[in-house]
Amino acid sequence: MLLSRKPDHERREGRVERGNVAAPVLAAIPAPSQRSLRGLDWFIFFLADVQTGFGPFIAVYLTTQKWTQVEIGFVLSIGGIVALIGQMPGGAIIDAAKSERLVAALAIATIGFCALAYAAMPIFPVVVTAATLHAAASCVLGPAIAAISLGLVGPLKIGERLGRNARFASLGNGVAAAVMGTAGYLLSSRSVFLVTFLLAIPTLIALSRIREEEVDIARCHGEMPREAPEPGDTNIWHLIRQRPLIVFALSVLLLQLANASMMPLMASAVTARSSQWATVLVAFCIVVPQAIVALLSPTVGRKAQAWGRRPLLLIGFGALAIRGLLFATVRDPYLLVAVQVFDGITAAVFAVMIPLVVADVAFGSGHFNLAQGIVGTATGLGASLSTALGGYVSDMFGNATAFLGLASIAALGLLLILFVMPETRRTGIAAKEMAG
């Protein structure tokens, strides 16, 4: 199909092939400014810093405040339940929003004040309320980041952008863990939450650097371009019934079912085999995958457009299965650190591919963020079931059997992608033009 020539600042329409279905898309989208792109980079970096403060540090801090393990477990469970049931409502909120930046800013402010509440009043009602609000706010931040990214760069350049997002999130996690660990050691565990509150300020500043007028609301929601004809069906039920979305959500559930309990089980095994160096070895086992994610994520984003989505999904599941097999057979605790390279490969693939495949499937529906919520719910279910399943099998049959079982689940996910999941990458004239 011939594409009409217009000035660079205007959009042009083309057609791309998605399987056997042709969908109208923009063949060229005005490039966002470097200010907005850099703002998004630093927003993701500082947001990762902020979220790191609510990780294991909560348990450490509440323990120092004389909380019982039952009380700590209850608070963590409340947060987990809210995060699970809030995935789809969070996505729907982003789809309905007129400004993703405003929703993200409100969520960040909420999280900042939750951190302050932890530090100021570590009493049961305040902590439970803070945990609930933090989990609810986090449910909109994930979809908001993906939506802002899609609104800035468009559907056919989102792969590389998501790779860059994953790199900055990984760097933020690593830096924050080091800073907060140092603050907790030199000052007190309470200082971690004060640092978290202060980090919300540069996060909001970075968000403000993203220009509102460059974030196309229609693209944020996965709608067709305003200049393009309406798609055939934007009904929510039509989206939910799509086979690629159902198959992908199931594969993500299997991914988390296989993956979530591997690290806790491995940490227990390392402690049993080398208690003196267990803390250092576990720390390295966390750092190694983060470094791999930072290095590989942009490449994953680029290759997703060149190779398609399915080859990379197969690589991610394959690395997870190999990791489980090695954990079951490797006895040297120091070699287990090297095995974590496979964790980094899996994390780099799925950090990019989950929002990217969802963007493919939800293209033209206007419900991109709701679709993210559906897959996010599958993620939460898989992770919740994994820890219980892995722990039970480990207690009954030993760690080696547990790791073999988790590797088998990963292999099942690989087979699901290989034989059932269709390719979702869009190709054609518009894709070639935009890639160029």
Image (cartoon, rainbow, N blue to C red):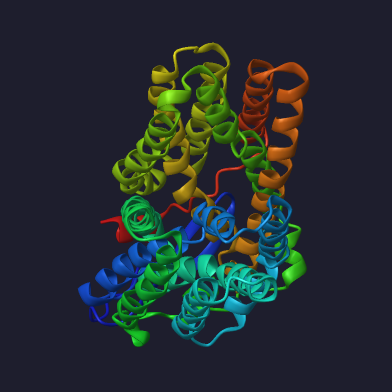
Front-most of residues 56 and 64 = 64
Number of marks in picture: 0
Question: Is there any visible trace of residue 240 in the rendered image?
Answer: yes
Q: Would residue 74 be found to the left or right of residue 165 on screen? A: right
- Percent position (x, y) of residue 406? 65, 27
> Up-down: is 431 above or below 298?
below
- Percent position (x, y) of residue 158? 40, 60
> Up-down: is 3 above or below 183?
below
Question: Is there any visible trace of residue 345 in the rendered image?
Answer: no
Front-most of residues 136 and 59 = 59
Which residue sits at x=66%, y=56%?
72
- The answer to which image quadrant residue 85 occupies is bottom right
Q: Would residue 252 be found to the left or right of residue 276 on screen? A: right
Which residue sits at x=63%, y=22%?
403
Q: Would residue 305 be found to the left or right of residue 402 on screen? A: left
Q: In the orientation shown, which residue stands out farthest toward the front?
A: 66
Q: Would residue 283 be found to the left or right of residue 412 on screen? A: left
> Up-down: is 191 above or below 270?
below
- Percent position (x, y) of residue 248? 64, 47
Which residue sits at x=43%, y=73%?
148
Front-most of residues 152 and 205 = 205
Quarter occupied by the N terminus: bottom left
Quarter occupied by the C terminus: bottom left
Which residue sits at x=49%, y=28%?
319
- The answer to which image quadrant residue 289 occupies is top left
- The answer to which image quadrant residue 130 occupies is bottom right
- Percent position (x, y) of residue 20? 59, 51
